[in-house]
Structures are given as C-alpha cells and as structure tokens.
Amino acid sequence: DQQVKQNSPSLSVQEGRISILNCDYTNSMFDYFLWYKKYPAEGPTFLISISSIKDKNEDGRFTVFLNKSAKHLSLHIVPSQPGDSAVYFCAASAFSGGGADGLTFGKGTHLIIQP
Amino acid sequence: DAGVIQSPRHEVTEMGQEVTLRCKPISGHNSLFWYRQTMMRGLELLIYFNNNVPIDDSGMPEDRFSAKMPNASFSTLKIQPSEPRDSAVYFCASSFRGYGYTFGSGTRLTVV
C-alpha cells in the first residue's frame, strides 16, 4: 500500500508559466514533508520542506502548500524555467523521539518545461 | 563539505557473486539511510541507522541483504549471493536528527 502518492507520472509546462506538482498521503502520523528534485544519474537533491504546523512555505520561486485535512500537498514553481526539467519526488516523515526514521517517497513526477 | 560519498558509481557482477556497496555520510550527521530505486517500486527505504545502530531493517528484501555501520563515517550494504532482480540504483543518505537529508549520487548495480 503506497502511503505517498504522486498520481501524475509526467507534467509538461511552458517556460514562464506556473508548474503545480501534487502529492497525497495516507498516513496521519506523517508530520514533515519534503520535495526533492532529481536529474538523471544523480541523487535526489533537497528542494523545500514543510512541517505540519504550517500550511505554506516559500523559498524563492518554490512554494509548498499543505492541506492536512485533505492529506494533500503541492509544489508550485513560478515562473518555470528550462533548468526545472527533472523528476520531482514528494517525501514524508514521522519523527519519533527526535530521531530520524527515514523518508517515504512517492514515485515521482517528471516535469518537462517547454521553451 | 564533500556531501555523501558512495562507491562504486557503477557495478556489474555475475549472478551468485557477492556485492558490497559503500557509503561515507556527511561529517556530523548522526543518521544514515540506504534506499533502492527501481522502475516498478520507486525509491524504497531498506534500512537506517541512528548513531551507528541499526534501527529498522524491515525494508531489507531478503536475508541475502545485510548492512553495517562500524563507525560514524562509514557504512556498507552487502548482497550475497546477488541475483538479477537486485539490479537497481542504490542510494545512501544521511541527516542530522532528521533534518538535512542529503543523498549520495548512487550506485548503479547490474547483476547479469
């Protein structure tokens, strides 16, 4: 049973427009969420995160929104640039006792920015 | 900081052989994770260590897989004997108290 779901395997967006990537989760114990970006032949790179005590976190062109009641989060990229073309992974974690218990990943969304 | 360092980058081995993947976490990080990425299953957590102690190995697929962390700066993931279905990209990641998860570049394993 997949606890973190990214239902769009791919997304194509025109350069300069907004890219919206979605993620749903089922485990109510998750309280920390992250987005990672991955280029071919490289490891995932941290992009932005959000704690469950917030509903929005912004970092430059990237904003993550969290809707806890719907168990849904989204990543907005504005404006989209060609270098944003990559696979984006949504990940979630449930901290226990202040330690780290690993991340549960979605299967990723391949974002393609069209010139 | 050099980041999380994994070796080798690529490994091709014959079925039945032993394979050892290596990871050096970021200095100061106290948690280390091994993940496997396949087309079918995406990124799966195999095992993680906190302060060099294995905490959860429920993601390890079979007894053929084992992992060790003899000290804070080194970990290995061993597959013995290897099988073609073990072919995947294996990632190591480290963090400090759950924050700053950083991944290595991965080891692409091919078992023929």
Image (spheres, coloured by chain):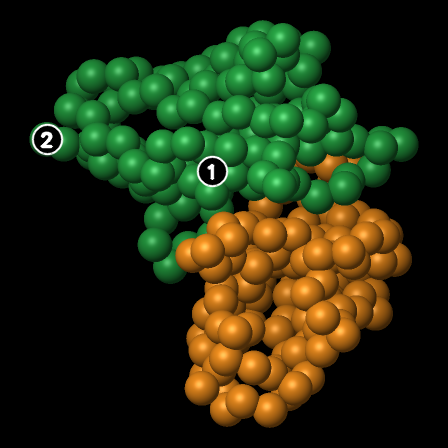
The structure residue drawn at horizontal position 59% and vertical position 39%, both measured from the top left corner, is: A2
Q: Nearer the viewer, residue A3 or B98?
A: A3
Image location of residue A90, percent across then percent down: 51, 33
The structure residue drawn at horizontal position 30% and vertical position 21%, both measured from the top left corner, is: A19
Q: Is residue B19 above or below residue B30?
A: below
The outermost residue toward the front is A1
The outermost residue toward the left is A115
The 10 Å Cα crowd at callout 2, few under 14, some 14 to 19, many 20 or more, is: few
- Which residue was labeled with disc 1? A89
Q: Is residue A115 above or below residue A100?
A: above
In the rendered view, does B41 fall on the left or right side of A15? Answer: right
The structure residue drawn at horizontal position 38% and vertical position 59%, both measured from the top left corner, is: A41
Distance of label 2 from label 1 (alpha carbons)? 23 Å
The structure residue drawn at horizontal position 75% and vertical position 31%, both measured from the top left corner, is: A94
Q: Nearer the viewer, mark 2 or mark 1?
A: 1
Q: In which quadrant is the N terminus of chain A drawn? A: top right
Image location of residue B15, percent across then percent down: 54, 89
Colour chain A is painted in: green
Q: How many marks?
A: 2
Colour chain B is painted in: orange
The 10 Å Cα crowd at callout 1, few under 14, some 14 to 19, many 20 or more, is: many
Q: Which mark is residue A115?
A: 2
Q: Determine the image quadrant of residue A37.
A: top left
